[in-house]
Amino acid sequence: MDDCGSNFAQWKNQCLAKMDLSKKGSIDEDIQDVVRFINLSENFFTTSSCSGRIILIDGASDCQDVQKQNCSWLFVTHQMCHKCDVVSGLERSQGDAVFKFEPFVLHVQCKQLQDAQLLAVRSTHTLEVPVSHKGQQLVDDHYIDFLVEVANQKMQENLRRIKRFYDSLKSAMHPEKLHSEMPDVAEKKSVYKRRRKRAQERSKAALCQNIKENTSSGESDGLDSGLDLFK
Amino acid sequence: MDDCGSNFAQWKNQCLAKMDLSKKGSIDEDIQDVVRFINLSENFFTTSSCSGRIILIDGASDCQDVQKQNCSWLFVTHQMCHKCDVVSGLERSQGDAVFKFEPFVLHVQCKQLQDAQLLAVRSTHTLEVPVSHKGQQLVDDHYIDFLVEVANQKMQENLRRIKRFYDSLKSAMHPEKLHSEMPDVAEKKSVYKRRRKRAQERSKAALCQNIKENTSSGESDGLDSGLDLFK
């Protein structure tokens, strides 16, 4: 990857100049600062992002997997949700509706392997609940109340994790600058340095890649998470 | 990564010689062939795996996220589940029980970046449903019936995907050998060659890394899946 450096800057400029083709057409408010910060670094740029969302998706009743091409969105929010919106969305269900919470997602191109390893994070922070079948509601009103409460708790925790990720990223990428601003950054610096060292050592030996259809497993997978959001 | 080759073989031998420290202590039956095949290649070795499972986890009621350290397993199977097992597990719930389907997971160390890119896959194939709160069941008997049916459908689809992944992996890693065995492998070979070429081109330009807490988003993320399981 000798030509990585020169190609990366050119590739970054091309990608960031493209129009936002997402359904929303803009970056979610709660993740704008993180995206802006990442794209200010010469070692990274973002290709897509979501600040986290609560969605009610109506899928075909004969479909075993919710895919974008064969389902309709009955309701979506990137903030906390209100029960009335979920209920009215569910009333419009004609197939198999699934109530989902999806935490924040960032896809980032990294110049160097150790930068990518530094950023690798995951957790079990999700929700995926069938709530109707062939248009018929499967759960009662009290359960909808509970789901809304759980989804909103997860959304609040998600916002805390975005902030923790952003703080960790800043301390990892600009330790000396933050050191003067933040009294508690000294520990983060040393943690970062240890991880950076491990990441660099590992990158010399081999590349690590998850092969998985889904990362919702609560079990440790033996991989080192560069920025640990889950303490 | 000049010393990648020599280090990798040594590292692989050390890792594969270690005792299996997982709760089960052995490789799941439905994924043994894939794991054995991967470990026969000099470019890969597995560090952990799961063939997919249906689990009922009892978490602390004051906990917003199911984590291994503060929850108990009421029920787990790597095959299809029976309603009676789910019901009896749910009867033992004292906190917030969550019924989950988790598809197959492989963690693989790769010698070369293009090998890792070749193998990157994901999907939205999951289920995570709260079914009790503070030991009280939240859903009725008919809903449990439906969840068991959905989870078993996902497990069947999961087994099909393991086979499809294994077939694709064999055609990708030994195209000439499989060509004589499998009449339909010619197309796979060309698909593989195109992906291999793309992966190699990309690896020269930059490294790609997902930053996400969870990959259950149904939206396209602009990443190239090396082995496409989802056609």
Image (cartoon, coloured by chain):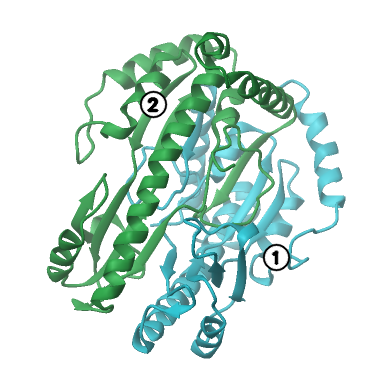
Chain colours: A cyan, B green
Label 1 to label 2: alpha-carbon separation? 41 Å
Q: Residue at x 43, y 76 (%)?
A: A153
Residue B146 horizontal/vertical position (percent): 33, 67
Residue A83 horizontal/vertical position (percent): 49, 87
Residue flagged by tag 2: what amino acid is it? Val
Q: Against B140, is B201 above or below? A: above
Q: Viewer-proximal residue, B200 or B21?
A: B200
Please give the chain letter of the residue carrying mark 1: A
Question: For this view, does A138 lie left or right of residue A63?
Answer: left
Residue flagged by tag 1: what amino acid is it? Gln
Q: In this figure, which residue is indicated by the disc labeled 2?
A: B34
Q: Secondary structure at mark 2?
A: helix
Image marks 1 and 2: residues in contact by CB distance under 8 Å:
no
Q: Residues within 10 Å of mark 1 (few under 14, many from 20)?
A: some
Q: In this figure, which residue is indicated by the disc labeled 1?
A: A32
Q: Viewer-proximal residue, B131 or B7?
A: B131
Q: Which mark is residue A208?
A: none
